[in-house]
Amino acid sequence: MTANATRPEPHAAAQAPRGEQRLRFAVVGPSGRMGQQVCALVGAASDLTLACRVGVEGEPAAQTLLAVDAAIDRGDLAPLDVLVDFSHRSAVAGHAEFCARRGVAWVLGTTGLEAADQAAVDAAAARTLVFQAANFSIGVALLLDLAARAARVLGVDADVEIVESHHHHKVDAPSGTALAIARAVAGARGQALDEVVRHGRQGLVGARSRGEIGMHALRLGDIVGHHELHFGWPAEGLVLTHDARDRAVFAVGAVRAARFAASQRRAGAVGRVGMAELLAGA
Ligand code: NAD
């Protein structure tokens, strides 16, 4: 966690009402970078119980999903409300089957899914509540929301440029988040992104065409993730900026998503939701 550990997160979700049973969490990949942070947040929350840590065979302080399943059958482990999953795509199908069969809400942050993995996610969403997000930052979710609103209001005549900065180890460009921002703008303006996106500019590229969305990537230092969305039109301009300074923002957002998913699931909800639904309920 960053800065002031004693001060609650400004965007932390409301705690469960007094007297309500604590939400029971299972966390996958407890020794992974994300899993460690999620375990720490759940362990520190007065309304949540870290019921079990789910890991690969031999992972310290973790049980395999098979062992967790058997413990629930024997009655050694009380039923779970939610499984928080930042692991690996190879685990997705097994987690999908478990959550669907047990009716456990599933918060899925694992990325790099193949088509068959996503099909398993969608099948699980027919039987339980699946909260899937490629980026659990509340700030990025808000940025996407604001981007679409600004694009709708300003229309296709406003020039749009997206500039993203990341640490010098990042191997792909543009970032997934920059692409999500571009999709939000294009979608709001009724454009097909592939037809209007322009990656970088060099040489005699000619005048900017109407509706173009420019994308630019900076790679330097240890920047966790910085995104700027620029709108320009005659005599005015607007810049929306998001800065991620610590990977902890993803864990904070995932725990907030898990509270939301577990509560919705207790009320009987099924389906696939994401950050847009979380913001809509805020
Ligand atoms: P990591 O390598 O640090 O941790 C991965 C964890 O998953 C480890 O504990 C590992 O033992 C466990 N694991 C691997 N295979 C498994 C399997 N088959 N079954 C159960 N557990 C398994 O990785 P990380 O940085 O924590 O990221 C994990 C995933 O989350 C990646 O896909 C990453 O891209 C994604 N991620 C998503 C967000 C988001 O906001 N959605 C943010 C950060 C990372």
Image (cartoon, rainbow, N blue to C red):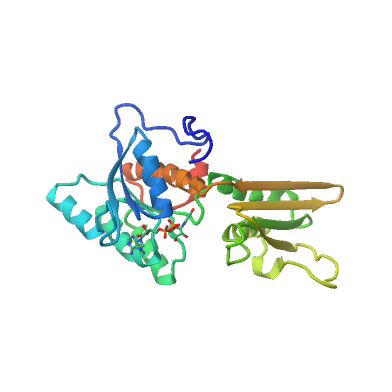
Q: Is 160 or 223 nearer to us in this picture?
A: 223
Q: Position of residue 47 (x, y in %)?
A: 34, 34
Left or right of 185? Residue 154 is right
Q: Position of residue 28 (x, y in %)?
A: 34, 54
Left or right of 189? Residue 91 is left
Q: Residue at x 75, y 63 (%)?
A: 212
> In the figure, 141 relative to 98: above or below?
above
Left or right of 94? Residue 107 is right
> In the figure, 203 relative to 257: above or below?
below
Q: Is 82 or 61 nearer to us in this picture?
A: 61
Occupied quadrant, residue 183: bottom right
Left or right of 164? Residue 72 is left
Occupied quadrant, residue 255: top left
Q: Position of residue 13 (x, y in %)?
A: 45, 36
Q: Farthest residue in the top direction? A: 18
Total numbered circles? 0
> In the figure, 209 relative to 37: above or below?
below
Q: Residue at x 70, y 52 (%)?
A: 229
Q: Farthest residue in the left direction? A: 74
Dividing the image into four quarters, tell me where ligand 1 lies. bottom left
> In the figure, 91 relative to 241: above or below?
below
Q: Residue at x 51, y 45 (%)?
A: 249
Q: Residue at x 29, y 27 (%)?
A: 19
